[in-house]
Each structure stands twice: as C-alpha cells, then as structure tokens.
Amino acid sequence: MCTVCGCGAGETKIEGGVHENSHEHTHVHEDGTVHTHSHGHDHEHAHSHDDAPLGVHSHTHHHSDGSEHSHAHVHEGEHAHEHGHEHDHGHGHEHGHHHEHGIAGDLDYGTGPARAHVPGMSQARMVQIEQDILSKNNAYAAANRQWFDERGIFALNLVSSPGSGKTTLLCKTIQLLKDKMAISVVEGDQQTSNDAERIRATGVAALQINTGKGCHLDGHMVGHAMQRLQSADDSLFLIENVGNLVCPAAFDLGEHHKVAILSVTEGEDKPLKYPDMFAAADVMLLNKCDLLPYLEFDADLAEANARRVNPNLTIFRVSATSGDGLSAWLDWIESGLEQQRNKRSESVDALKRRVAELERQLAAK
C-alpha cells in the first residue's frame, strides 16, 4: 500500500535534524491525479464508515485561509448500496451511512495487477505510481549498497511485526559481537528514540529515524543515516526497521540481506499471511524459543510454512533470553562480514593491478 499512497510523506525525523510537516495532506482523485495541500488549522473528524472501500461520495474541505475544495471518492465493487451523508468540515463532521450488502463470499482486494486497492484510482495508475516510487528508492538503495561494498561493510535489515523481540535480540547480538567487530545501528520507529537509547547502552553507535505516519524505512532515509554515522570500514551495519510485516518488504535499503524475525508467541501461519516479507528475506530467526514448552506453537510447522513461501530461506531457532541457538546466528554474521571484507580486498587488488598495467603501458610509449 505504501508504494502507491505515499504515506508519511514529509514527516520523517532523523536524530540531529528535523524533516517534518505534520499537517500535509495528499488526496487522490478518481482520474488518478494527486494533489497535496497543507493545513494550518486544527480540526476534528468524526467518521462512521462501515464499508469505506465501496460507493461514491464527495468531501468538501474548508481551510483556515477561507478557501475550500471538494473531491469525489469513487469506489469500485460489486455491491449495490445507498449513502446518506451530512458533512460539516469546519472543526468536525459526522457521516451517516446506510449500506445494504448481499453476502456472497470473502472480499479480496489483492488480486489485481497492483495487488492493492485505493478508492478512485485505477489499477494501471497504481502500478505506474508504484513503479515510480520504487525506482527512485532502488536508486538510493543501489548507492547505499555500493558505499557498503567499497568499504567492506556487511549490512543487514531486520524486519518483523511489533513485539517479536527484535530489539532485545539485537542488543544480545551486539553484546556478543562488539569485541570482535565495529558495529553501528539504525533504528526505525514511528515515534520516540527508546530503541536507539537501548542500543547505545550496549556501547555502540546508533541513530534513530522517526518516520511519523510512515510505516517503513526507505533507501533515502538510510542514506542520510549512513552519512551521519560514518561507519568504520570492515564493520557490521544493522538496520532495525519499523515493526511491520507488510510495507518494508517492498523497500530495498541497500542491505545485503533481509532478516525476518518471527516469534513463537505469534502464529505458525504468519509466513502464509504475510508472504511478501518472507519471500523477500534470506534469513528467518524463530525467536523466543525458550517459551516453546509453555505454548501451543508448532515450530516445525512454522518453518515449513516459511519454506512454502521461500524454499531457500535460512532459518535459525534462537532465544535472546537463554542464548539458545545464538552461536549459529553469530557464526552466520561473522561469515558474511568476512565475505564482504574479501570482496573489498579483491576489488582493491584488481584496481592496483589495473593501475600497474596502465603505468606499464605509459612507460612503454
């Protein structure tokens, strides 16, 4: 959805700098055009939308400068229903809706080419917007990855739903590795710097990115964080993304691997419900395994479901509390960092050979 709606635009805040505009609204019209305007006023909206994705209705907005605009919302669907609206957009409005629907099976808004739904926007327009957004993000991500590769830095993007134990696991990982390698961390949350403070308490550098209404980090945000952190060559760069199993799947940050974390306090079918994330990941950490004796959670089934989505997934069963399984996870990180260092050395050696060859050719003339 983030690839077409532009959620959280203008609300990102990186520690040490402010990029905020908390009163900017974006509206998408039925012809696919988009306009953005800022509100310099406080208002309250009271909505009662029982079935918002369906039907046709118009909205009028009154602004503090006395101007107003109206726009129509067109909803596609196979249901016939009636709307009765009364709008008052001064400092609040109420909507009264009356819907009559025939129940004829589940609704699936993810079957079109865009695999998502925005009221009043065609699938073709949604695909175009998604391609535009992701192409820009991918350019930033490619630049980030090149920067990492040139310096032998191993970058991981940790993703999960809220409450999976990401930050606790990250802190434990840092504590066990920080004497072996330099580590820097980017923390992504909608608000607060709580997690960055927890990371800094382990003794490594961390930078908080607050995304406001945005529900994921992107390549541009991480690029700014990289500039501020100035990570050491041949080091480990860890990104803890916003807790969300949907939107971060689509956004490359320049990492070398996405690491999906699934805790045993969640359902075994989570990989099937959120397949895009587990398909995009290279590694899955099945976390909080110390709780397995107390839960009705089938770890084997969870792993099987994850591999139904992504047969090539590397899976580690771990517990940040007991330490079980962490040695294999840490070995995997050390191996990845060593590969990055070797790639950098090979690139430097190849460049030296090329320079020597050019010098030889010049000397021969």
Image (tube, helix red, strand yellow):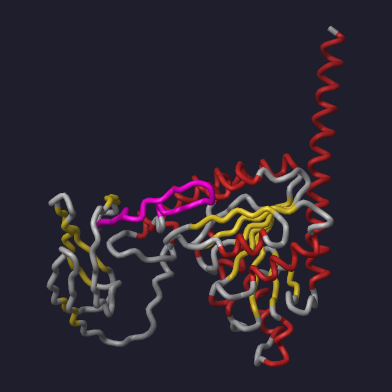
Tell me: residue 139, above or below residue 64: above
Front in this rendered view, residue 11 or 301: 11
The quadrant of the image that shows the C terminus is top right
The quadrant of the image that shows the N terminus is bottom left
Confirm whether the magenta stretch covers residue 303.
Answer: no
Tell me the quarter of the picture where residue 99 sits. Answer: bottom left
Horizontally, is 79 left or right of 207 in the view? left
Residue drawn where x is 30% and y is 55% of the image: 25
Front in this rendered view, residue 213 or 275: 213
Give percent across and percent down for residue 157: 64, 59
Give percent across and percent down for residue 203: 72, 58
Any part of residue 312 in sight:
no
Horizontally, is 158 left or right of 127 in the view? right
Any part of residue 33 in sight:
yes
Residue drawn where x is 62% and y is 55% of the image: 186
Looking at the rendered structure, the number of numbered marks drawn on it comes to: 0
- The region drawn magenta spans 9-29
Residue situated furthest top in the rendering: 365
Give percent across and percent down for residue 115: 44, 65
Residue drawn where x is 67% and y is 41% of the image: 147
Residue drawn where x is 75% and y is 73% of the image: 316
Confirm whether the magenta stretch covers residue 23.
Answer: yes
Give percent across and percent down for residue 330: 80, 64
Tell me: residue 195, above or below residue 11: below
